[in-house]
Amino acid sequence: MELSGGQIVVQCLKDEGVEYLFGYPGGAVLHLYDAIFHQDDVKHILVRHEQAATHAADAYARATGKPGVVLVTSGPGATNAVTGIATAYLDSIPMVVISGQVPTAVIGSDAFQEVDMVGITRPCVKHNFLVKDVNDIAETMKKAFYVATTGRPGPVVVDIPKDITDPNVIIPYIYPKSVNMRSYSPATKGHPRQIKKAVELILAAQRPVIYSGGGVVLGEGSEELRELTRSLNFPITQTLMGLGAYPATDKQFIGMLGMHGTYEANLAMHESDVILAIGVRFDDRVTGKLAEFCPHSTIIHIDIDPASISKTVKVDVPIVGEVKLVLQQMLEEIKEQNKNASKKALEAWWTRIESWRSINCLEFDRDSEQIKPQAVVEMVYEVTKGNAYVTSDVGQHQMYAAQFYHFDKPRRWINSGGLGTMGFGLPAAIGVKLAHPDEEVVCITGEASIQMCIQELATALQYDTPVKIINLNNRYMGMVRQWQEFNYESRYSQSYMDTLPDFVKLAEAYGHVGMRVDKPEDVMPALEKAFAMKDRTVFIDIITDRTENVYPMIEAGKGHQEMTLRVAPGTPINRELA
Amino acid sequence: MRHIISILIENEAGALSRVSGLFSARGYNIESLTVAPTEDPTLSRMTLVTRGTDEIIEQITKQLNKLLDVVKLIDLAEASHVERELMLVKVRTCKETREEIQRLAGIFRGKIIDVSSNSYVIEMTGPSDKLDAFIATLDEKNIIETVRSGPTGLSRGEKGLHL
């Protein structure tokens, strides 16, 4: 097959089985767009801003496990994509971003729409390439997909100057079957000696906790995690990124941990003697004050990335490998050692955990005359029977969604955990709906976040991706306001917008259905009505209690044992610890 | 503690900036850095001197290994090794000091490689502290300029850093 550079790029995408390409045209990628015009295997989704292309592709990847693919032009197209690339990088999402570049002859001359894309993205990609020869395109694309999807996944940028895609330069095309990279060999199985050591520790534990994260979702280890947790009868907590890998409705799940985690999860971590950390990275939002993190614990850490091990918290038994394989190895080793964890010790441990659980730390005022955001999430859960794909933006609503939408399956909870990117939710919902057209997709957002990518309502109409947007409208940047209430004596500096749009009219202007709810008793009927409209995008603007806070909360710099609970707002709880 | 990290890296555009970018982004310090192609033209060898606690050095080596351009690395300071640094010093001379400077350079096994009517350029190699000592013996106001390569080194014995 003889093809031009532009055609080769598109053919590579076909050979990779790419279904959707999220992008926005511009000068440097016009040859490429012409190649796209002549085929319809790879469907192009035209967004309204390049940031949204990256979020939609990223969410498509989160919901399917397949890499998300993006195409943007040089200069501003490329820089607009950077936020989304960094978002994917921080959450280890496989993504290939193709950016146009000015012709090779003028690179470095500050040409029109020129930026050093390879330089700009270097700190927020797994790897990036500048293609300088049309003969290198196929191999580079193969490498890009291979690197993005193997090991610890991540975004890869392929920067292609315009002359490389010239339709007049035709060369033979062969897509390589495999790649050989001498400096890249991701880990597979865990070291047997480490597995043995870990299992010995686990079986001897008196107060164990399984702390699992996004790596289990990304590494498809959910089934093994369930089997291991159930066979051991250990309590399990999950990070924001890990939700769904273990079912939230199971009794062994003690809730999310960290800054807005449950009382029982954080205290169990604090008092534990053995922590089995799986696919996590001991993020500061999880650990709180490092010096006080799990003071009595021996820590076992399973991760695909050696650099994650002992990065912030010193690990006692590191196991580097693919989570699925390592968990299988552990299950076998448990059989081999043919011992059980101490039943008596576990019973006592569970009794203690149940006593923490009994304070019901997530409870909120259910008799309020105002709409409570938590109640809305509970109702969304009920209406969707817990089966929806839920995307979110960043802030209080994100925490309410994580706390009150009980995810029982992996890949259903789609949010920007690491970078915390406002504007993620709506384009993400579009990406998920394209991946799963028959599933219910909900975007739980707030009136500040949604405005950061609101233009994507147009994309949702163009590609007929009916999603339900739940706008928890408290007329504040809620999380900013909460921190200002706690730490700045309620000086609400710039956390309030004086002029909010009429979201109902806005939704209608974009061709969707808009609804507004301001009484608690109207929420459920509105949700039922909205979710009954299967083929429409519905924007439900819900006017919630403006002063509501997310509890429990570990304020920045404090330990797990120093949670602030709702029972006495603002008062730290200092319980006697064993 | 001081560590000398020796790195085999793909001889490609941008590889050096990936390494230096990693250090600045993660707040690690680089005391010195030398890099040049090896006998295999597809590879460069980089010698990087840094300081940090054991935990930081462990992170540095892991993060470096994670870079796709980094093929292999060792921390020379972990075992017995030899290291050398090259220095060129340009000193101001006059009738009275010429002989004294020549004698000092001789003691340190330095070579005078350029002579003008009132200056010398002295070439010297050795461990970094020897070069420091030589500088200390010179009268500061006579030093016109110095240039140092930063240390480079190899492990002792028959083992080497290669593919």
Image (cartoon, coloured by chain):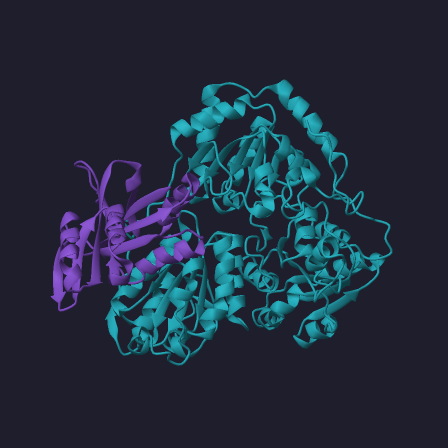
Chain colours: A cyan, B purple
Q: Is residue A533 visible?
A: yes
Quadrant including the C terminus of chain B: top left
Left or right: A553 with respect to B69?
Answer: right
Q: Is residue A244 visible?
A: no
Residue A272 on image: x %, y %: 61, 30
Left or right: A341 with respect to B82?
Answer: right
Residue A258 on image: x %, y %: 63, 43
Closer to us: A314 or A507: A314
On screen, B21 above or below A245?
below
Closer to us: A362 or A331: A362
Question: Quadrant location of residue A393?
Answer: bottom right
Residue furthest to the bottom: A112
* Identity of the residue drawn at 31% across and 53% down: B32
Quadrant including the N terminus of chain B: top left
Closer to us: A50 or B155: B155
Residue A397 on image: x %, y %: 69, 56
On screen, B111 above or below A252?
below
Residue A493 on image: x %, y %: 71, 65
